Amino acid sequence: MPMSAWVLPDHIADVLPSEARHIEELRRGLLDTARGYGYELVMPPLLEHLESLLTGTGEALDLQTFKLVDQLSGRTLGLRADSTPQVARIDAHLLNRQGVARLSYCGPVVHTRIDRPLASREPLQFGAEIYGHSGLEADLEVIELARGCLLHAGVQGLLLDMADVRVIDAVLAPVSLDAARVTAIHAALATKDVAELQALSKDLPGPVRHDLCALPRLFGGVAVLEEARRTLQPSPELHAALDSLAWLASHAQGLDVSIDLADLRGYAYYTGMRFALFAKAPKGEPVELARGGRYDEVGAVFGRKRPAVGFSLDLRELVSAIAPRPLVAAIRAPWGMDAELREAIASLRSQGHTVVCVLPGHEHEVDEFHCDRELVRVPADGGVWTLKNI
């Protein structure tokens, strides 16, 4: 049976009026929130030459990227799967500032596959990034901005979950391992598979094996950081990571904080702290809504290594996790060529009102407006067009 021409690809969907309005209102609000912190808006292109788009991003982003051939140049292009490398390129080559740069963006990205059930392959990615400052002040500002964006969206009861990739780097620093074994260790840590970690580390020095097998149980409240100091082999890199997490946790206002030192999501990407913000659910597991961290290497491939920290979220995902917004109040008006009627409608619209004209022979059909007033002619007032509550 032939497929209908209007059937969309898997995990690609139209956005209908109610959701589209909600997404657009959130987009404007989040960009305004970022601007309130001093972030400047940039708009990277959806298409780039593939070698530029994927430079330094690793295999994971390559597998997520759609490729096509440019009919003008014959070169291979890619549809962006993540905006952060593009923003790093803008900072490194186009702005080329010496001081701090705060940049925000919002636009679609496209993925070849989904990374979790019910996800979209066309997220609408909003993000904000700070370039040029390596201190914890920038890390905290990004966390605060992410919190501010979610509060603007109406999300309450936020949980901040943090980790730091320098912890596993410190644990493995005494040994030299091939890339395949490091990858296997990361995978076992991600699933907290202690038996697999024991097998992978059986020929490693005792302290390294002990620390690897201890990491999966180092999760919970902020007290985990002190437990890690007691449990893991001390080193300057380890203590720098734990000190950073402790400082951020103590200054994260209005957030419940959890720590998971075995969480290595984005390991190849991040160079320090990474975080996620979750909305607590009345029933079931918390829902992850924003994620980010420090990625100081992101600009190195563009010839300008600068400290960088940021976060991103998917507006479509965010809208699905929060309550719908109320309908927009509107005014119903008849359609007509009467000069006074047209002048009254134009005046109301110039004042910011929504006026829905009922076309001849049709009752208007809208889902997004609540017509709570009507424009009517009042003969007793000399035929003046007047608003009447419905």
Image (tube, helix red, strand yellow):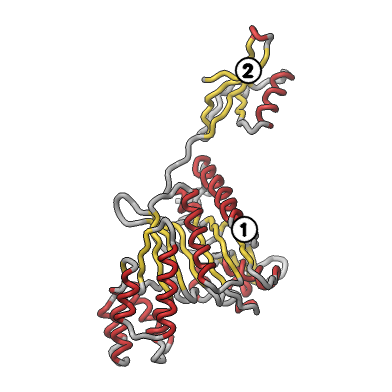
The answer to whether residue 101 is visible is yes
Say few, some or many: other residues with alpha carbon within 10 Å of mark 1 (under 14 / 14 to 19 / 20 or more).
Answer: few
Query: Does 37 appear above or below 76?
Result: above
Q: Nearer the viewer, residue 170 or 389?
A: 170
- Counting the numbered discs, the total is 2
Q: Nearer the viewer, residue 377 or 14?
A: 377
Residue at image mark 2: 386
Please give the name of the residue rendered at 72% of the width and 20% of the height, measured from the top-left corner: 337
Give the amino acid type for the residue marked by disc 1 in the picture: Gly
For the residue marked with disc 2, what is the amino acid? Thr
Residue appearing at x 69%, y 65% in the figure = 71
Q: Please say if 105 is above or below 135.
A: above
Q: Which mark is residue 38?
A: 1
Can you tell which mark lies on residue 323?
Answer: none
Looking at the image, residue 370 lies above or below residue 77: above
For the residue pair 332 and 113, the one nearer the viewer reads as 332
- Expressed as whole percent of the image width and height from the top left, the position of residue 315 reads 50, 53
Q: Which class describes the residues within 10 Å of circle 2: few (<14), some (14-19), or many (20+)? A: some
| Mark 1 → mark 2, Cα distance in angstroms | 44 Å
Q: Is 380 positioned to the left or the right of 329 in the image? A: right
The percent position of residue 247, horizontal first and vertical second, equals: 43, 69
* Residue at image point 60% right, 28% down: 356
* Snapshot quadrant of residue 252: bottom left
Q: Residue 221: which quarter of the image?
A: bottom left
190 over 170 or under it: above or below: above
- The residue lying furthest to the right in this view is 339
Q: Circle 1 sits in a helix, a strand or a loop, which is it?
A: loop
Which of marks 2 and 1 precedes in the sequence? 1
Where is residue 288? Give x, y as percent: 41, 58
Residue at point 63%, 68% (across, down): 100
